[in-house]
């Protein structure tokens, strides 16, 4: 699908916990297909320091209402301003951007790993993977129980496994400490999005277990369409832009020391 710049209407806003919000953005025109793992670039109006658009993964696509849902974690001026928007407000969005994950094949057993707000792209990925008849498992890592969100919603699409750094919910520790990371689980593919150290650790495990693994990188971005080169990452084929060649990369193509 060619990317569009358009005003979407905020039709639903849900505060999930102290710093996470779901925003449902409706298009007047029918949406063409959006791949799980693609992202949108949002213009933040009336903010002093946010003239650059802010990127957010597509969390869900609701084709029946022409809506895209994004999960926003408030971390700075842009995200605080965005969640202040009111129902009916117009939000200027460029979408869909980036490549997206490769969908699994029928009967493949897959593990979708999200750390922190890295869970965002995994909802649509889980939904479409289940529709493709894959066996879907989610592994969701958070700092603490209060940061674990959307568990019931993820359960609609697969089995949910949890870790928290402080052990207040699920297995204590980081996602790679979860016992699901064992050879006997026999996953065909792993998909991961989250903080860089987490993705490196997951990539290392996947490599050791010889499991195909895709990661969605969240490098800082400026232009969002391959011009400024501020988002580049090193690959076997040289530097590539995360905004246009990614954000999803297979770990075998990245120059990671794993
Ligand atoms: C492809 C992609 C997909 C993303 N998807 C989501 C999503 O689904 N939901 C979501 O809440 N966020 C997502 N992010 C991160 C989000 O874009 C940033 O949190 C947001 O731009 C911060 O804007 P701000 O003005 O609120 O904060 P700023 O004032 O710009 O920054 C506040 C703090 O956040 C840090 N920060 C800003 N951007 C990033 C980043 N990309 N990675 C790590 N730290 C950052 C800054 O270093 C600073 O410490 C994504 C980023 C990328 C590149
Ligand atoms: S953000 Fe400008 S090239 Fe990727």
Image (spheres, rainbow, N blue to C red):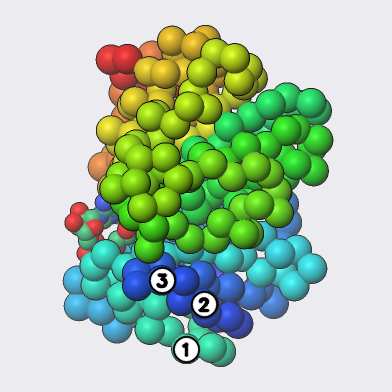
Q: Residue 144, can we see it?
A: yes
Give how far across and how far down residue 146 sits, in percent. 38, 63
Whether residues under marks 3 and 1 lie with C-beta atoms below 8 angstroms apart, the answer is no
The quarter of the image holding the C terminus is top left
Name the residue: 28% across, 15% down. Answer: 257
Mark 1 Cβ inside 8 Å of ligand 1:
no
The answer for how far apart the CA atoms under marks 3 and 2 are is: 9 Å
Residue to which mark 3 is pinned: 17
Q: What's the mark number on residue 251?
A: none
- Please tell me which of labels 3 and 1 falls first in the chain: 3
Image-based side of 168 in relation to 30, left or right: left
Quarter-of-image position of residue 195: top left
Q: Residue furthest left?
A: 49
Look at discs 3 and 2 and give the one toward the viewer: 3
Rendering coords of residue 173 (x, y %): 33, 38
Local SS, label 3: loop
State the separation of the CA atoms marked 2 and 1: 11 Å
Q: Position of residue 236 (x, y in %)?
A: 38, 14
Residue density around tag 1, few if under 14, some if 14–19, many if 20 or more, within 10 Å = few
Q: Is residue 234 left or right of residue 110?
A: left
In the rendered image, which residue does mark 2 sit on? 14
Query: Front-most of 44 and 148?
Result: 148
What residue is disc 1 on?
86
């Amino acid at each position: 699908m060619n990317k569009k710049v358009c005003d979407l209407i905020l039709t639903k806003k849900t505060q999930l916990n102290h710093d996470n919000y779901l925003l449902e953005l409706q298009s007047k025109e029918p949406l063409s297909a959006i791949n799980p793992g693609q992202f949108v670039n949002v213009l933040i109006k009336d903010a002093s320091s946010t003239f650059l658009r802010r990127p957010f993964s597509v969390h869900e696509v609701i084709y029946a209402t022409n809506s895209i849902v994004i999960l926003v974690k408030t971390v700075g001026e842009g995200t605080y301003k965005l969640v202040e928007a009111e129902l009916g407000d117009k939000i200027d969005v460029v979408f869909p951007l980036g490549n997206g994950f490769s969908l699994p094949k029928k009967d493949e057993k897959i593990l979708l790993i999200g750390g922190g707000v890295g869970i965002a792209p995994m909802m649509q990925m889980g939904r479409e993977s289940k529709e493709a008849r894959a066996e879907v498992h989610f592994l969701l890592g958070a700092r603490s129980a209060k940061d674990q969100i959307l568990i019931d919603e993820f359960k609609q699409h697969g089995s949910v496994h949890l870790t928290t750094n402080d052990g207040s919910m699920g297995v204590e520790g980081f996602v790679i400490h979860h016992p699901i990371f064992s050879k006997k689980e026999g996953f065909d593919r792993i998909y991961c999005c989250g903080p860089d150290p987490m993705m490196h650790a997951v990539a290392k495990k996947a490599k050791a277990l010889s499991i195909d693994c895709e990661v969605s990188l969240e490098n800082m971005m400026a232009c969002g369409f391959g011009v400024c080169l501020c988002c580049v990452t090193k690959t076997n084929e040289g530097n590539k832009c995360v905004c246009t060649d990614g954000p999803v990369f297979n770990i075998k193509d990245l120059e990671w020391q794993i």
